[in-house]
Amino acid sequence: MSEKQPLLQPIKLGDIQLKNRVVMAPLTRCRATNEFQAPDEKHIDYYTQRAGAGLIITEGSSVSSKAIGNPFVAGIYKEEQVEGWKKVVDSVHKADGKIFLQLWHVGRTSLPDYHDGQLPWAPSAVDPKVELRNAHGEKKMTVAPHAMTVEEVEQTVREFGHAAANAKRAGFDGVEIHSSNGYLIHQFFNNISNVRTDQYGGSNENKARFFFEILEAVKESFPENKIGCRLNPSLNGVFGMNGTPDSIPFFDYLVNRLNDHDLAYIHMSEPFTDVSNINFLESDIARHFRPIYKGNLMINNQFDRESGNQVIKEANADLVAFGKLFISNPDLPHRFELKAETADWNVETFYTQGREGYTDYPTLEEEKVKN
Ligand SMILES: Cc1cc2nc3c(=O)[nH]c(=O)nc-3n(C[C@H](O)[C@H](O)[C@H](O)COP(=O)(O)O)c2cc1C
């Protein structure tokens, strides 16, 4: 019998046994259209269809109303949301899947429209200067956010803790702290978005403080080996975030410190844009961070079956997260196993509402029946 492809080999995250290393990346899909912004029947079907993944990481789920910067995101701070997620989790578990919830706060990457006209919160009053859509689909430019007071920082840490407790009650196998892609925690990491002079700004230790306080708050509900975190060290020119000469040294520091914690994994992204001509940013994230991090390293961004197998085979990562391929291929690991064709995704329905482009992508078998 031929040996299984590296992506299809099982792996243990702490005491959680995954059937393969094909992870469904977190994907905001804007389908929570009910008055509570809670997951509903559509979400149950969508996630259950994808339970063949070794691990599903849910869409970023708002930890509070202040965390919102996109319409129709299924949050995790209201009781109805916990109940909605519980049904999703139960169904994924019945289908033999494992599922982590991604804890999300967008910080300054939001509009006053989402906050009754009040300013979004961020480490400092630095406008990311990006165009966003409000809940009515209107495009608007961001504004300079409100610089959080220490009390507001502490409140936000508690909100992450409360959200994690809710995730625990909903039955999730674990949580991923969204500390990347230019959102609130990443805004604390970066020297352009964080110009604070108190204990949350300046030195590496200070810039990491908010993250580690959140980690402690989340640990009140989950042991470390059921907590992951997401990092995007070379993010540049997207979501209003740019790298600086301090970025990679900061992430080296952070990842080194994470070696003292027994996390389920660190989820890293290769650069979202070409940074090969920026000498202070790192073009090959897996290769750079693999020797530094001693735990499970999950890698993402534009991988396919071949490059995913390759990165694991070369021991530069332990797991691979697939985003867009999982949108259009609910049975992605099965297709990998058969070395079958994968279906293309439709960008037009990434963020629309309803089931179109959400639960109607066929599996290979369903495709065959159709043809
Ligand atoms: C529609 C869409 C929604 C996304 N939403 C999230 C999100 O909620 N949280 C997150 O961390 N990343 C999010 N991402 C980024 C993906 O997790 C992933 O990093 C990106 O799609 C690149 O991986 P891929 O090339 O395999 O698609 C999103 C990407 C897309 C295309």
Image: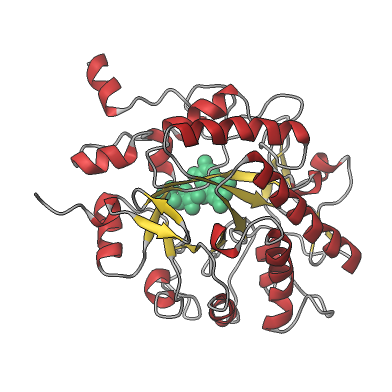
Q: How many marks?
A: 0
Work out whether 186 lies above or below 352: below
Work out whether 193 lies above or below 30: below
- Residue 358 showing in the rendered view: no
Q: Residue, x 10% and y 51% (percent of image)? A: 2
- Colour basis: secondary structure
50 sits to left or right of 240:
left
Q: Quadrant of residue 52?
A: top left
Q: Residue, x 59% and y 64% (percent of image)? A: 224
Q: Residue, x 79% and y 66% (percent of image)? A: 123
Q: Position of residue 18 (x, y in %)?
A: 39, 51
Q: Position of residue 41 (x, y in %)?
A: 58, 22
Q: Quadrant of residue 200?
A: bottom right
Residue at the farthest left position: 1
Residue at the farthest top position: 370
100 sits to left or right of 343:
right
368 sits to left or right of 346:
left
- Residue 45 showing in the rendered view: yes
Residue at the farthest front position: 15
Task: Name the residue nearer the viewer: 325 or 52.
Answer: 52
Q: Position of residue 239 (x, y in %)?
A: 62, 55
Task: Name the residue nearer the viewer: 9 or 103.
Answer: 9
Q: Quadrant of the C terminus?
A: top left
Task: Name the residue nearer the viewer: 42 or 173.
Answer: 173
Q: Position of residue 48 (x, y in %)?
A: 46, 31
Q: Residue, x 69% and y 31% (percent of image)? A: 83
